[in-house]
Image: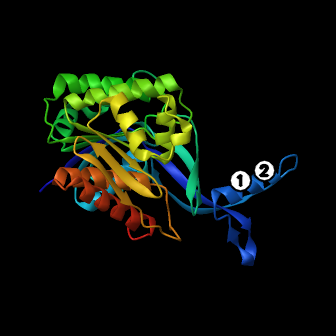
């Protein structure tokens, strides 16, 4: 069965580093965020220098990572993103981005500090002159409608890191309301990204907007643990119950009126929908090769498995297996 995927609308060039606590022949990296944080705290009132080992410079952003994973799984992909260089042409970093691709503005720039237990992104803010949706429709022309209308899976990603994303997503919803008929056998997956810097009102509003897409597609919101806590806090969920993922998922789903809430943490992955609550434990990888993009790989695999008609538990298994393969270096 063919799976046609459309994703938008970000795009970054990631420089991925490992912070070193020792350089030279006895080179050693900071293994955990806590270890690195403790070292930084210990330098208060002093001057400090930390060497960064460049692991790779590569295409980044949630949309490119999502598309790359979906294509690797066998999907037919199209995308619109921030993929241009300073000349306005497609940046060579994105040459290997699979499928049909359109750039509507310049790529963002981000650095990621990788650790065995996670990552810290240091991203420059992205601004947009004018109306982003007008720029997108101008750059894509007549190709936009069939890409979106024919997609079995639409991925709407990275609301939190783009200052103009709220306006862009609302324009996209208005476009869907005019263009799409209700086809609940097709899917729309939403990934807000790290919402920690957003206010409660902003989070409530974007959750409400997410539910409005359910009129056109089976709509899934997918969150990692930090994003889940941020959404829960905005909705008044009691912090002492943060370990109750099912209750958190229920609060998020009720507030947004989406069809399905998916939460993926380092310990387990969970889906809550009208079909019930399904939970699958995560198999730990002791020495991950890379973690940047693992969440996007999980999301792409979960959406792909949904299109294929797998049961909910099998979708979770499939998504976790794809993320595990990615993290361990089996495929990027």
Q: Picture coordinates of residue 206 (x, y %)?
A: 40, 27
Task: Using the image as rendered, state which of residue 271 and residue 50 is in the foreground.
Answer: 271
Comparing 87 with 142, the one in front is 142
Q: Which residue is mark 2?
A: 41
Residue 147 image position (x, y, % from top left): 20, 39
Q: Is residue 48 left or right of residue 68?
A: right
Identify the image quadrant of the N terminus. bottom left
The residue positioned 56% from the left and 35% from the top of the image is 125
Report the residue at 33% width, 57% height from top.
69
**Residue situated furthest bottom in the rendering:** 25
Q: Are marks 2 and 1 in contact (CB under 8 Å)?
A: yes
Find the distance from the CA under tag 2 to the CA under tag 1.
Answer: 6 Å
Circle number at residue 27: none
Name the residue: 17% across, 54% down.
Answer: 308
Residue 74 lies in what quarter of the image? bottom left
**Circle 2 SS class:** helix
**Which residue is at 50% across, 40% downward?**
229
User: Judging from the image, what secondary structure is the residue with disc 1 in?
Assistant: helix
Measured as percent of width and height from the top left, residue 301 is found at: 30, 56
Q: Is residue 130 above or below residue 85?
A: above
Rendered location of residue 321, percent (x, y): 34, 64
Query: Would residue 69 appear left or right of 17 to someone viewing this image?
Result: left
**In this rendering, would 38 be left or right of 61?**
right
Q: Is residue 266 above or below residue 101?
A: below
Q: Is residue 11 visible?
A: yes
Q: Look at the picture and state if 115 lies above or below 221.
A: below
Q: Residues within 10 Å of mark 2 (few under 14, many from 20)?
A: few
Per the rendering, the mark at residue 37 is: 1
């Amino acid at each position: 069965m063919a799976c046609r995927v459309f994703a938008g609308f970000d795009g970054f060039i990631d420089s991925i580093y490992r912070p070193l606590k020792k350089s030279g022949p006895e080179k050693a990296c900071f293994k955990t965020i806590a270890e690195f944080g403790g070292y930084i705290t210990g330098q208060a009132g002093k001057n400090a220098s930390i060497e960064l080992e460049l692991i790779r410079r590569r295409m980044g952003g949630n949309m490119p990572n999502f598309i790359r994973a979906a294509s690797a799984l066998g999907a037919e992909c199209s995308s619109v993103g921030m993929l241009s260089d300073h000349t306005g042409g497609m940046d060579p970093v994105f040459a290997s981005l699979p499928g049909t691709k359109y750039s509507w503005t310049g790529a963002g720039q981000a650095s990621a500090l990788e650790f065995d237990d996670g990552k810290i992104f240091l991203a420059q803010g992205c601004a947009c002159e004018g109306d982003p949706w007008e720029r997108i429709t101008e750059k894509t022309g007549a190709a936009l409608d069939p890409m979106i209308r024919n997609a079995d899976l639409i991925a709407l990603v990275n609301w939190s890191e783009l200052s103009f994303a709220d306006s862009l997503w609302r324009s996209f919803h208005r476009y869907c309301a005019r263009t799409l008929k209700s086809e609940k056998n097709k899917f729309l997956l939403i990934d807000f990204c790290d919402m920690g810097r957003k206010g409660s009102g902003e989070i409530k509003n974007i959750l409400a907007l997410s539910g409005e897409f359910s009129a056109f597609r089976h709509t899934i919101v997918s969150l990692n643990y930090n994003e889940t806590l941020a959404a829960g806090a905005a909705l008044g969920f009691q912090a002492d119950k943060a370990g109750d993922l099912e209750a958190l998922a229920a609060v998020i789903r009720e507030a947004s009126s989406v069809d399905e809430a998916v939460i993926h943490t380092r310990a387990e992955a969970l889906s809550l929908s009208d079909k019930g609550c399904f939970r699958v434990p995560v198999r730990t990888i002791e020495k991950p090769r890379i973690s940047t993009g693992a969440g996007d790989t999980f999301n792409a695999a979960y959406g792909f498995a949904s299109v294929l008609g797998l049961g909910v538990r099998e979708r979770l298994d499939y998504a976790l297996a794809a993320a595990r393969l990615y993290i361990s270096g089996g495929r990027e």
